[in-house]
Image (spheres, rainbow, N blue to C red):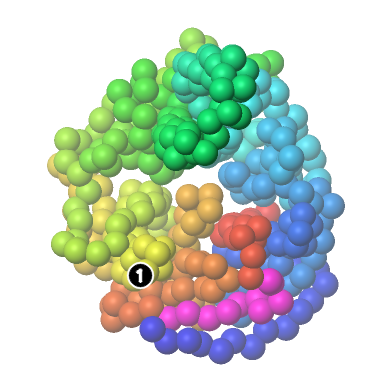
Amino acid sequence: MELEENKKEKYGQPPYFAQYPWLLICHGDAMHRQTYFSVSENRYYMKSIPEVKEKIIHAYVDEWLVLQNINSNDCYLWNLFSNEKIELPPLSTKGDISRCLLSAPPHDPECLVIFLIENEDENTNEDENKNNNVDKNEDENTNEDENENSNGDSNDDEDEDEDEDVSSDEDEDVKLLTFYFCKLGYNTEFHKQDVQSIIGDSRLGIWIIFQKKIYTLIGMQHILTYLDVDNDSGRITATPMTNESPIRLKSYYGYYKDYLIQSSSNNMLLCVQLMVGGRDFRMPCHLQVIRFDFTKERWMKAESIGEIAIFISLFMGTSTTCSTKGTNLKKDSIYFTYGRHLYVYNWITHSISLSLPCPHVSKTKNNHMHWLTLNQ
């Protein structure tokens, strides 16, 4: 792995509407600073936009961003160029926003906003509360006995505490996934539907808009599935596109992260498989690209991705592509970030180079990095 030194210059105002993707880094204690890195110019631009302060970017289409307040589930759409703001119906849930999809710009009549909300199992919580009440009453009734026999019962108490901790950890892993979706200008509240009832599985992978349709990978087998959202009925139906899992490289270490991509140059549905390994199973170590053949209904290995570059946003689980013709971008390459570093995987040589595009950005877990294609 090769470390590249980059020369960077700082400017006050970035030219947002660029032909090539920007790497937007939201950082600072309250994510109140933004740094825009132009990979085509190898320069970064520093700026602080009040509207993006203390916000999380969940999705985007063109210059429209879906923003969430870091202290609540309040979300809305915001235009980076015009500063226009479009309110969304309130999310009536205490669950965490796991993922978001904006299907089209707000002026498109087919524009849908879809949230994937992660909730704890309500039945588990009720059982836990009942157990806590029973334990509390038992503790009150046996408090005197425990004081008298504290030395003899100390080991038993430790065992009980350990059991409670294990039970608590298991409860925390019990999650329910729910779709919240609405059409802008039509709905005053979100439709809600349980993911398990739609796909028969609680595991939902990356999703994407391809040819104005929503596709996702579901289950342990990562089956490509078409999601049909009927806003009038408030229902979502799922149709598998194949019975086959994506092609995998044989590996005895690490695991894959999958990213669905629409190739802008040849209008193909691609899947980038990022293998991560290392001591903590988080370090990117290999990539592979496959394409879906809708005629044969199967995944095919891509021998080359041609004169295009692929950009992956690990945090949002989104990606984009652009042509490398007439640019200094590397063809047959995949750009992605890990920590503060920018990685470039060369498809021809199967090598990975890395650089530190913005050294002023501190090393912290609060940094969010997104690839944005901003065309005006």
Left or right of 157: which side holds 49? Answer: right
* Marker count (numbered): 1
The part of the image, by quadrant, that contains residue 48 is bottom right
Left or right of 190: which side holds 2? Answer: left
Quarter containing the C terminus? bottom right
Left or right of 54: which side holds 138? Answer: left
Tell me where residue 345 appears, x and y as whole percent: 38, 74
Q: Is residue 116 above or below residue 260?
A: above
Q: Which residue is drawn at 19% across and 53% down?
A: 247
Kindly tell me whether residue 25 is visible in this rendering: yes
Kindly tell me whether residue 113 is visible in this rendering: no
Tell me where residue 279 appears, x and y as whole percent: 37, 69
Q: Which residue is drawn at 32% across and 36% down?
A: 218
Quarter containing the N terminus? bottom left
Amino acid at the residue labelled 1: Gly
Q: How crowded is mark 1: few (under 14 residues within 10 Å), some or many (20 or more)?
A: few
- Label 1, on which residue? 278
Q: Which of 75 and 87 is in front in this view?
A: 75
The part of the image, by quadrant, that contains residue 169 is top left
Q: In this picture, which residue range is highlighted in magenta? A: 353-362
Q: Is residue 354 above or below residue 81?
A: below
Q: Nearer the viewer, residue 364 or 64?
A: 364
